[in-house]
Amino acid sequence: METKNNQEPIHRLKYENKQILLIGTAHVSQQSVDMVKQTIAEEKPDTVCVELCNSRYQTISQKESWQNMDIVRVIKEKKSFLLLSNLILASFQKKIASKLDVRPGQEMIQAISSAEEIGAQIHLADRDVRTTLARTWRKMGWWSRLKLLFQLILSFGDMEEIKEEDVERMKQQDVLETILDEVGQSLPTIRQTLIDERDQYLAEKIRTAPGRKIVAVVGAGHMRGIIETWDKPVDLPELESLPPKRRLGGILKWVIPLIILAVLAYGFFMEGTQTGANMLIWWVAANGILAGLGALVALAHPLTICSSVMAAPLTSLNPMIAAGWVSGLVEALSSKPKVKDFEHLQNDILTIKGFWRNKVTRILLVVVFTNMGSAAGTFIALPMMMRVL
C-alpha cells in the first residue's frame, strides 16, 4: 500500500495489462477532495472510475432532481418506507458535510471534473442504487426494517458530537473494520447488500474498465473488500438481479386475514350475534384507533386521520391494500406538496423537525406510521377477540 497526504489510503493494483490506482476516501472529507484532485492531475490516467451509478450521477449533477419526484407514484409502487429510510441515511451524510463545510460526495464530483480536465474517460462503477436498496429490502423482514428505521431516527442526536478528526479517523482500516463488524452483528443483511455485494461489483467494474491506466475513487469502507475480491470471479448478472419475495411473507398476508375472518364467523354463528358484534367492535377499534394514532403522530391532515381510522379495519383484511397507502394518498391530495417543499427537501431532512414540517417527508411518515399502527392493531385485536369467545 502507498499513502499520500495525511494517511490517505492508495493501493496500486494490476489486472492483465492494466495498472489501477485505487483511492479510498471519506465521502464528507475535504482532504479526500484535495487528494483526488492531486492524484488525477499527477497520474493522468486513461480512465477515472467513480463509486457512482447512473441514477446517483444524475442526482449530483442535476440540482432539480428532487423536484421531479412523483410522491403519489412512490406510494402506489409501495416504496414509501424505502424512500424514507434512504432520506434519513442521506441526512446523516449531509449533516456531517455541513459541519465540515464540504458538499456530500464532493470527492466524486471532483474526480469527474478532474477527468474532464485531462480528457480521461469517466466510468461509473457502482451498482444501481435502486437495485441495491431493492435487494436489501427483499432480504429484510419487517422487524429488521422497523429496527433500522428506529435506529436511524434515534441516532440523529449523536450527529452533533461528530468532529472533523472523527471523520478522518474513520478512514483508517481498523476503525472501519470495527464499524462494519458492528453493522454485521445488528443487521447482517444490510452489510451483505450495501457493503459485501458492492465490494464485488466495484472490483469487477473497475478491473474491466477501459484503458490501461485507471484511477478508481471509492469510499474507504470498500477498500478491503475490493482488494480481497480482486482475483476472484464475480457474477455481475446475479448481483444485478432481484431475489424473489419471501414466500412466508406472501403466505402470511393471506393466512392472517383468513384466520381473523374465520374467528369472526365462528363468533357470529356459533356463539351468537352479541358475541360476534363484540369481537367485531374489538377488531374495528384496535385497527382504527391505532392506525389513526399513527397518522396523528405523523401530524397528518384531519381528513387523513379520519381516513386511516375508517380504512384500517378493512385494509387489514385485504392483502392487496395497506392502510398506510390509503392515508398517504389522502394526505398527498389534502395537503399537496408545493414546489418549495421539493426545493427545501435536502435541507429539511437535516433535522427531525424538518422531516415533519416538509410535506413530502410528512406523507412518507404518514404511510409508515399508519401501517405500523394498523399492524399493531391486528396483533392486539386478535387475542382480545379470542377472549370474548
Image (cartoon, rainbow, N blue to C red):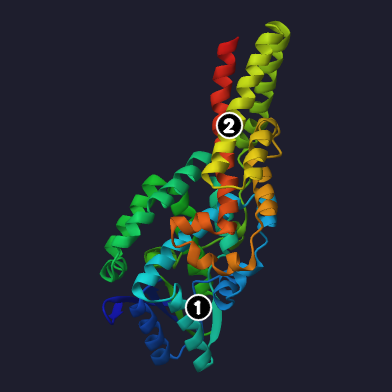
Residue 152 lies, in percent from the top left, at 42, 52
Residue found 39% across the figure and 45% down from its top: 186
Q: Is residue 12 above or below residue 265?
A: below
Quadrant containing the N terminus in the rendered view: bottom left
Considering the numbered disc 1 on the image, is that residue within a helix, a strand or a loop?
strand
Q: Quickly name the residue at label 1.
A: 49
Residue 236 lies, in percent from the top left, at 58, 62
Residue found 59% across the figure and 77% down from its top: 62
> Which residue of the protein is positioned furthest toward the right in this rendering?
269
Report how far apart the C-alphas of labels 2 and 1 lie in the structure.
53 Å
Residue 31 lies, in percent from the top left, at 33, 79
Q: In this view, does 39 lie above or below 24?
A: below
The answer to whether residue 1 is visible is no
Neighbor class of circle 1 (other Cα within 10 Å; few <14, some 14-19, many 20+) is many
Q: Nearer the viewer, residue 370 or 183?
A: 370
Neighbor class of circle 2 (other Cα within 10 Å; few <14, some 14-19, many 20+) is many
Label 2 or label 1, whichever comes before in sequence order:
1
| 388 relative to 9 in the view: left or right | right
- The quadrant in which residue 170 appears is bottom left
Residue found 69% across the figure and 24% down from its top: 258
Amino acid type for the residue under numbered disc 1: Cys
> Which residue of the protein is positioned furthest toward the top in this rendering?
271
The answer to whether residue 265 is visible is yes
